[in-house]
Image: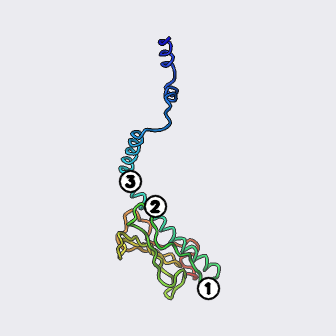
Amino acid sequence: MEVLNLLNIRRKPLAQRYLEKDQSGYSVVQMAVALTCIGIVTTLTFPLLTPVIEISEVLIAEKYLLDAVKECQMGLINGEDNPFYTLPPQSIGFGFISTRRFQYPYTGIDGECLSDSGGNILSAQRMSNNQVIPTFSLNINVVTGEKTSEGDVPSFIDWWEGSYSPFIQEDDPLLL
């Protein structure tokens, strides 16, 4: 009789044998091994993601600057005497690297497109480690779309220099 019971146990699927042992979860050792493996993989992959995070933050900053130009030019096209643009949040970063962030200073009056010199200059300045002087900055004239940069601009930002005008031609009298 006992020989038959042993044969029956061996014929049962592996999953069914584990269920019969009344296990309902992971042991502490299994959980510790799993968390250690996740920690090692995270430690190895995070430095590889840092450039991707940097590029993403720059693209977000660029989007805020270009959106301000679009808002100002649409205001000029619609005949507004003093068009406004939406100010970006004053400090932006993903939070993974808390010592780096973008700040958005501007010339003129906040949110106004036009200033005494023609157009308000909106900047995206990369600040690091609570520095007073930015590492680099991307500047744009919110009326004409003229783009400039200052500081140690990373090599992957090769599209920034020049002019950008989504709605108004460069020689249009609205920009003069």
Classify mark 1: residues with Cα within 10 Å, few (<14), some (14-19) or many (20+): few
Q: Residue at x 39, y 67 (%)?
A: 100
Callout in the foreground (1, 3): 3
Per the image, label 1 sits on a secondary structure element best described as loop
The residue wearing badge 3 is 46
Label annotation for residue 81: 1
Q: CA distance from mark 3 to mark 2?
A: 15 Å
Task: Residue type at mark 1: give it.
Answer: Asp
Q: Residue furthest bottom?
A: 116
Q: Count residues near mark 3 (Cα–Cα under 10 Å), then give few for <14, some for 14-19, many for 20+.
A: few
Identified at 38% across, 41% down, the residue is: 33
Residue at the image point whose x is 43% and y is 74% from the top: 148
Q: Nearer the viewer, mark 2 or mark 1?
A: 2
Badge 3 marks a residue whose secondary structure is: helix
Nearest to N terminus: mark 3 or mark 2: 3
Q: Position of residue 127 (x, y in %)?
A: 38, 71
Residue 63 lies, in percent from the top left, at: 51, 67
174, 117: nearer the viewer = 117
Q: Amino acid at mark 3?
A: Phe
**Residue toward you, 71 or 38:** 38
**Reading the chain from its start, which is encountered first: label 1 or label 3?**
3
Query: Residue at label 2?
Result: 56
